[in-house]
Amino acid sequence: MPSYTAPAKDAQFILHDVLKVSGSDIPGYSELEPEFTGAVLEEAGKIASAVLHPLNVVGDAEGCRLENGVVYTPKGFKEAFEQVKQGGWTGLDMPEEFGGQNMPYVMGTAVGEFFSSANQAFTMYQGLTHGAASAILAHGTDQQKATYLPKMVSCQWTGTMNLTEPHCGTDLGLMRTKAEPLGDGSYKISGQKIFISSGDHDMAENVVHLVLAKIPGGPEGIKGVSLFIVPKFIVSADGTPGERNGVSVGKIEEKMGIHGNSTCVMDYDGATGWLLGEEHKGMRAMFTMMNEARLGVGMQGLAQAEAAYQNAVEYAKDRLQGRAVTGAENPDGPADPLIVHPDIRRSLMDQKSFAEGARAFLLWGATLIDQAHRAGDKDADGLISLMTPVIKGFLTDQGYDMTVQAQQVYGGHGYIEEWGMSQYTRDARIAMIYEGANGVQALDLVGRKLGQHGGKYVLAFFDLVKTFCQENKDVSETFGKDFIDPLKAASKDLQAAGMYFMQKGMKDPNHALAGSYDFMHLFGQVCLGLMWAKMGKAAQEALDAGSDDAAFYETKLATGRYYMARRLPATKLHLARIESGADPVMALDADAF
């Protein structure tokens, strides 16, 4: 059975050595002293390893079941959910007035990684609830907030998001679910939604669905979509669950992975709902939830890669296979451990450098969200909006690839369920699809985000990289060669790709969109390159200051050098593909495929 240990030390390094959170002027960050964050992360790690992780294989093997209209979660899930709720983990970064602890979003993100690594399917129940609560917090009336948020923050009630229908996924303007006004401020919701994560279960008293639907007579397409609160049980005057609403589970989807999460077909048969936000402005309200969810999904890519990597390392150290080409390193044994072989080292370094770089990228992104929400910084909001498709698309693509590499370290045993490695690969796969498939993320990045406000935010990112390189070019000769020079070269590749889109894409949009997926990955590589340069600088400063944990910082530098030398040059491949234009992509007629 696989094991998992939360990387609390690495998270602390990023929070304090790299991001220097306690010295930030973002409201609430002054409280994030190392002792405080360390205590929170240590306790979260204990919950992750001792409570959630043992149930990961249980959830995968048992799945959820629907019996007589009731959804039952796997054995042990309900008790674990109570522990998580009692510990206050579900409301870590939610407002105190609704029962939360009001910690910054960056702390919720760090803890969320640990929980998702330990048990992704389980953690989705509270993750979807957090997103739904955030949407109500941003767009709900005072009465809606008072009615739903205290129970959702505590996860006494959980939440969902209902977008997809059998005939429409990304193109939500095609949806058929209707919301007919009843004249008393409520609406009658009728239709069917599919792929609804955490759609129903036995771990909460009520499930609060946020449902996209069209009010008859509204505008056509996406402009006619509104968002509604549709609880499983209609809330009584005293605030308790009352009459059963007209919403039911049609079936539980049979999936490749995340078996422990109840992914449901939801049938709305004249269910009572209440408008959340304004009429025909549903996508605006839903995007509050979707943007948060997309960052959470990016985190899932990292989380599965980290858990898979930890197990691959242990296997590579224990499994005896062959001899080192430079001479036996285990002369008293029948063979040397796998980890002596250069190709195994390459695979493990790929995984390690990705996970640590992705963690820094994700936590940096979380600080931008805090800066936007807590300090009202519109520039930070614009920058994280640009980064969202990169975080979601790049981290999940790469995270999945890393679980495959971890599985490969095991050889044939990686393909056998007994060893548990296939679950990481199967669970990671969905992250590339839901909350907007990664091809859509790439289109959003190139088609919408790059040009926002005249390209203000992508130019701001280029300036971030340029400023860092200028300020740190003289840290040392080796730092400049190992970190600054590769980062500058990669950034130039990203700028060249953007210039190509401006020159060619304006005349023929296909030239831009045919290269959008490569651009998303090119951008992601540069972001991780920037994170590794920042981590490399922090590690070097710690060593120069005579740190008593020199081994940790030397390892960090060596891992960073690997990323800059072996992973970051992928930007040149992506640029070459982008500059080949749309012609090779669009050459065939549809009938020729």
Image (tube, rainbow, N blue to C red):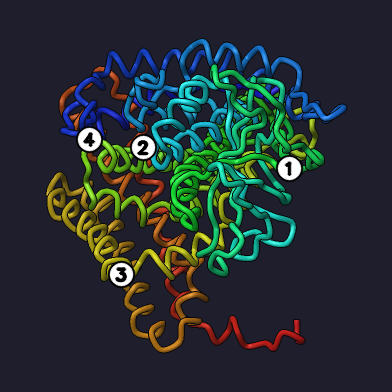
Q: Which of labels 4 and 3 is toward the front?
A: 3
Q: Within 10 angstroms of label 4, few (less than 14), some, or many (20 or more) residues?
A: many
Q: Quadrant of the C terminus?
A: bottom right
Could you say which quadrant of the image residue 49 lies in?
top right
Kind of residue indicated by mark 1: Met
Residue ID at (51%, 13%): 46
Residue carrying label 1: 266
Tell me which numbered mark, 4 or 3, is placed earlier along the sequence. Answer: 3
Tell me residue 424's x, y (percent): 66, 36
Are dots 1 and 2 in contact, CB under 8 Å?
no
Residue carrying label 2: 363
Q: CA distance from mark 2 to mark 3?
A: 24 Å
Tell me residue 470's x, y (percent): 14, 55
Q: CA distance from mark 1 to mark 2?
A: 34 Å
Q: Up-down: is 436 above or below 420?
A: below
Outermost residue on the right side: it is 68
